[in-house]
Image (cartoon, rainbow, N blue to C red):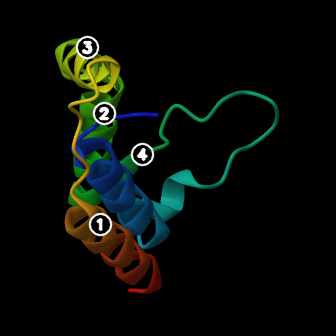
Amino acid sequence: MKITNGIGYEANKYIDKTTANQEVETDKKSIQNTGNAPNTDAVVNLSQASKEVQIAQKAVEETTDIRAEKVEAIKTQVNNNTYKIDHDKVAEKIVGTMFDDFA
């Protein structure tokens, strides 16, 4: 189980949303490619949203999915039978995630 405090989930949701609507602008005259030689005049301009997606993806890749100190604290509580589950908080997260999936 991953404990990410929602950061990875939110970033991935943003990436998915942005890439679905992303448009790539190209220079029309550079689209034509003659023969097998690569077209050195090809120009591709990435949108600002695309650049933001790349930054977000890099940030997600660089963060760790597991916070070891948090995991150890929970393991200790479970082993000592002192771990308390906030059922209302769990239910809110489940319902919130379901609404996010439908939005």
Give the percent coordinates (x, y) of residue 65: 34, 26
Between 9 and 93, the one nearer to me in the picture = 93
Q: Earlier in the sequence, mark 3 or mark 2?
A: 2
Q: Quadrant of the C terminus?
A: bottom left
Mark 3–mark 2 Cα distance, whole angstroms, equals: 23 Å
Mark 1–mark 2 Cα distance, whole angstroms, equals: 21 Å
Give the percent coordinates (x, y) of residue 70: 19, 22
Q: Earlier in the sequence, mark 4 or mark 2?
A: 4
Count numbered badges in the picture: 4
Q: Which residue was labeled with disc 4?
A: 43
Q: Which residue was labeled with disc 3?
A: 72
**Badge 2 amino acid:** Val
Q: Which residue was labeled with disc 2?
A: 60
For the residue labelled by badge 4, is the local secondary structure a helix, a strand or a loop? loop
Q: Earlier in the sequence, mark 4 or mark 1?
A: 4
* Residue drawn at the location 39% of the way across and 68% of the way down: 17
Tell me if residue 59 comes above or below residue 88 in the rendering: above
